[in-house]
């Protein structure tokens, strides 16, 4: 069994948490830019506008983006482009993409955008921050702000005492990276981070929001996940606080079906309806096994062969 169950739309938990706590994200990661903004005025996510400049949008990509309209303290409107890079690509492609998005925003909407990036990779030597070229009569130097999550490894004590929800987000991310091959240890940290939400007196809404993020990124094999869930429900009963329902958990497990289907369609194109129905009828254990096996499939025939060898309800 591999240590990771692949999930499509790895950016989804980041998009959700950014939308829930956008001011806090800016204050945590980019305090100088955050200090320019009047947070008493509502901010607006410009999803339609971003779709117009994101010509290369694809399913299953390894980054998340948000284009946001905010207001400066002096009343001026500004746009922020927040980029979350889940898995590092080559430096040239990433820096060029940051430049192109900024250029397209200005070209299409006549709005200069402040561009910043949150880098989630584990490469300490990869620190992109500019796109430039230089010729005798023409030169360009485009710089953008970045934060590197692995840099917080040496600031763990600060994370533990911080009241900003993104401290918890970073802690979950770092412990996910550190426990790739130590899944028992990951289970312990997952429980510890969620318990910390209760112990610090977070409101129910915040506990649920941060729980969803932690639960999504700190993936466990089925056996450990079942153990974790039982221990967690016992803890909630002990505290007389039942914020996370069994229904939410079941809904999450059912969502795995669509995750696997989207991963397969990204590799092989649109699946036949009969194949989709076969996948939807698999047990969660079978879905986990399929999630591991699909990485080795060379074509659709191998997927069909796997389904024939692992019929629904066979486990």
Image (cartoon, rainbow, N blue to C red):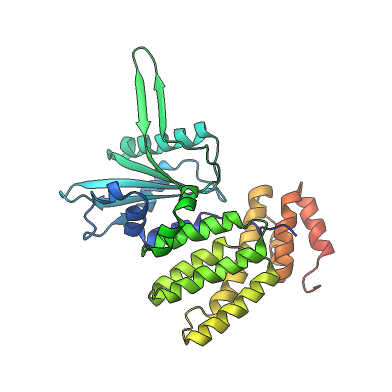
- Quarter of the picture holding the N terminus: bottom right
Left or right, residue 247 beside residue 149: right
Nearest to the observer: residue 240 or residue 107: 240
Percent position of residue 114, x then y: 32, 42
- Determine the residue located farthest toward the right in the rendered image: 309
Give the residue drawn at x 32%, y 47%.
80
Q: Name the residue nearer the viewer: 292 or 59.
A: 292
Taking 41 as reference, is 140 left or right? right
Q: Position of residue 165 (x, y in %)?
A: 40, 63
Q: Quadrant of residue 45?
A: bottom left
- Residue 20, located in which quarter of the rendered image? bottom left
| Vertical arrangement, residue 129 with respect to residue 186, above or below | above
Quadrant location of the C terminus in the rendered image: bottom right
How many marks are shown on the rendered structure? 0
Residue located at (36% from left, 47% from top)? 49
Q: Residue at x 50, y 31 (%)?
A: 92
Q: Nearer the viewer, residue 185 or 12?
A: 185
Query: Residue sitting at 56 percent across and 71 percent down?
Result: 191
Question: Which percent across, then down, holds residue 234?
Answer: 57, 84
Query: Looking at the image, which residue sits at the far left?
Result: 74
Question: Which residue sits furthest top?
Answer: 136
On the image, which quarter does residue 162 sit in? bottom left
Whether residue 149 is visible, yes or no, is yes
The percent coordinates of residue 90 (x first, y second) are: 55, 35
Q: Is residue 281 visible?
A: no
């Amino acid at each position: 069994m591999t240590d990771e169950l692949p999930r499509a739309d790895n950016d989804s938990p980041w998009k959700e948490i950014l939308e829930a706590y956008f001011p806090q994200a800016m204050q945590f990661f980019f305090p100088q830019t955050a200090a320019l903004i009047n947070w008493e005025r509502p901010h607006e996510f410009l999803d339609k506008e971003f779709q117009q400049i994101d010509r290369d949008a694809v399913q299953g990509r390894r980054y998340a983006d948000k284009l946001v309209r905010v207001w400066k303290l002096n009343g001026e409107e500004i746009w922020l482009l927040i980029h979350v890079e889940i898995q590092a690509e080559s430096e040239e492609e990433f820096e060029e993409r940051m430049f192109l998005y900024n250029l397209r925003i200005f070209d299409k909407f006549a709005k200069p955008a402040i561009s910043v990036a949150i880098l989630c990779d584990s490469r300490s030597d990869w620190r992109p921050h500019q796109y430039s070229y230089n010729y005798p009569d023409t030169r360009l130097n485009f710089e953008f702000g970045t934060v590197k999550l692995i840099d917080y490894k040496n600031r763990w004590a600060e994370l533990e005492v911080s009241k900003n929800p993104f401290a918890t987000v970073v802690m979950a991310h770092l412990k996910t990276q550190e426990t790739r091959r130590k899944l028992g240890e990951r289970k312990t940290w997952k429980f510890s981070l969620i318990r910390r939400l209760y112990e610090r007196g977070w409101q129910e809404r915040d506990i649920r929001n941060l729980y969803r993020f932690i639960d999504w990124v700190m993936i466990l094999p089925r056996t450990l996940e079942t153990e974790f869930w039982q221990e967690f429900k016992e803890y909630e009963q002990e505290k007389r606080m039942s914020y996370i329902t069994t229904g939410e958990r079941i809904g999450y497990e059912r969502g795995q079906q669509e995750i696997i289907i989207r991963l397969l369609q990204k590799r092989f194109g649109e699946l036949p309806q009969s194949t989709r129905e076969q996948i939807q009828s698999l047990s969660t254990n079978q879905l986990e096994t399929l999630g591991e096996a699909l990485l080795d499939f060379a074509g659709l025939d191998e997927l069909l062969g796997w389904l024939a060898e692992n019929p629904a309800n066979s486990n």
